[in-house]
Image (cartoon, helix red, strand yellow):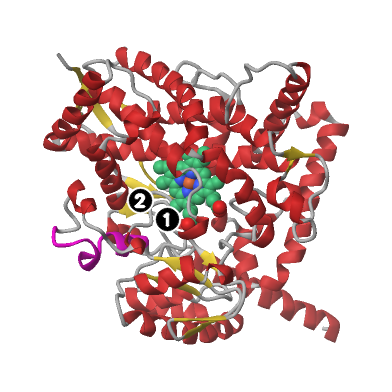
Amino acid sequence: MAPKQLILGVAAGVLLLIAFIFYVVAQADESYGVLRGFEGAGLWSGTLPGNCQGDDVCHKIKAARAFFIMATIAAFIGALLLLYIVFRPHPKVMYYAAIAMGTRPIYVVSDVEFLHEVFVKQFACFHSRHLPFTARLKSRNLINLFGANGDHWRRQRHVINPTFSTTKLKLTSPIVNECIDALMNKIQEKENQEFDIYTLYKRLTMDVICHSAFGIDTDMQNDIDNPFIVKTAYFFAVHPERIFLVKLSYLMPWLTPILTLFVHSIIALFNGLRYLAPSFMNQFEEIPGMWIINQVKQVIEARVIRIKSEANNKQRRIDLLQLMLDAVTSNEIKDKNDENLMSKRFHQDEVASNVFFFMIAGFETTSTTLASCSYILATRFDIQTKLQTEIDELYAEHNGELDYDRINNMTYMDLFIREVLRMFPIALQAVSRECNTETIVCNYKIEKGDVIQPDILTLHYDPQLWGPDDPYLFVPERHLTRRHPMAFMAFGQGPRNCVGIRFALMELKLCLARLLHQYSILPGKQIEQGFIRREILVIQPDAVYIKLEKRC
Ligand code: HEM
């Protein structure tokens, strides 16, 4: 064989070996989720096992760093496969191996002081979130708040924050109430039957997002095949870190620019073909993300035309879309150079991208929280009675009129929702930080590119942080005691926490108050079978089977 062919053959063999190692290791879904009562969290999900507290974190970081170096070398010589096979039965070793996966260390931390440094005190060094390269593919103006970094993120957050202020939310609460009307109508049809209420909650939260962020009046409760709900569901069915190209980019980060170019080319090819040969391309379903973005753009164009034609109309629709459009410019924005624009403005494409993200962020998270609330209420009648007492008092006080301020004053409701999210946090993987500048945290050197992944379930079930009541028991009153700020991370923490918290809480409280005022929730026969939780992008149950009984 000629030397050239030999080299090519060996290179191909090595590549195949790497791909094989990668494939085998990537299949190793770990036992973390199983230990914690749900299925699916694995090596690539970022939610890894860990039970370290206090000084243990030091040991963990040292071990992670050492293992990272070893594993990187090992991966390239094929020894990782051996390591994997030999140590697989030993969860602790797999845990460190998992941290070292890819070629960057991921520190899974449950030490509150360490997390406080990363999320709050040293935020300037940790302003990025750890995301796969596919999430940062789009052109600059199409990157949304969730994916943006540095000054780009700061400006977007600055513009979006007021959109979720109390004053603005008061204006959007009637829209949420209208969507709950549709839910209540649907529920009437289900009285005294066993049914899955989670499905109805998903339709509610999609209606709320479409009405308030898109500005379009949908009726998901009756239009069950609506493409918005169908396309959005795709995002929660596939974990981006399970995509082969993403795995490859973790194993070989130097390949990322080539992979980015490759994906861009595929998208361009599809878009070109769609334009040149529409009849042929109609046979293929449009990529869900592209479909939604295109819909959003059309809605925005229509809204902009309407605003212009109704320039003097003071009865403008007030929704999240309008509030963002108020800050829009069609000029290119330079984040560093133009202080003036930077502090106030949004590019019009950024509006589309953020509306798109609100849809993803507000749909599954809020409906899943409602699902978990219903599970607890159905199985804990004592808690349900307390909540109903508070709701009835509120109704009596205000002659049945609930608005933003009134529901915000419900103390027990607040404690109840917090406790649900402590025991069943949903979006664990969204809470990560990537180091942007080398720094020292709690005496440990963290390098640029290193990832900090809070071990939220360990934090949320830590008896030292949540005692004296057993953290495995549902006790809403435990939130009356002041806890460490990092003990509760269901909405993340620090300047980059969830921007939609108040919006989500308004929706949750309005919905639960109206539902529990009219009905009592009883467990369906299949409630436990349905409440099997799995993690893909978020941790969610399959279903919540209940019965609703009309209250006298
Ligand atoms: C119960 C419902 C919700 C939960 C549990 C939840 C949870 C989270 C979490 C854990 C994060 C990551 C925070 C961090 O990294 O520190 C996040 C970020 C975010 N959420 Fe939510 N979320 C909910 C509802 C919403 C809603 C309704 C919206 C908007 C309509 C929204 C918009 C966002 C955005 C834009 C970010 C990115 C913030 C940034 O990077 O600056 N979320 N959410």
Residue at position x 18%, y 48% from top?
Answer: 477
Disc on res. 425: 2
- What amino acid type should be assigned to the residue bearing mark 1? Leu
* Mark 1 beta carbon near ligand 1 (under 8 Å): yes
Let me know if residue 307 appears in the view: yes
What residue occupies the far left of the structure in this picture? 382
- Eyeballing the image, is 443 above or below 426? below
Question: Which segment did they paint magenta?
Answer: 456-469
Is the distance from the Cβ of mark 2 to the nearest ligand 1 atom less than 8 Å? yes
Q: In this view, does 137 lie to the left or right of 241?
A: right
**Image quarter (top left, top right, bottom left or bottom right) of the C terminus:** top left
Q: Is residue 328 magenta?
A: no
Q: Name the residue under label 1.
A: 428
Report if residue 468 lies within the magenta region.
Answer: yes
Q: Which residue lies furthest to the right in this view?
A: 276
* Residue that appears at 84% across and 86% down: 3
Q: Is residue 513 above or below residue 330?
A: above
Task: Please identify the dominant SS of the magenta region.
Answer: helix
Q: What is the crowding at mark 1: few (fewer than 14 residues within 10 Å), some, or many (at least 20)?
A: many
Q: Which residue is drawn at 88% across and 33% down?
A: 276
* Residue 327 occupies quadrant: top right
Horizontal arrangement in the rendering, residue 195 relative to residue 77 (left or right): left
Q: Position of residue 188 (x, y in %)?
A: 30, 13
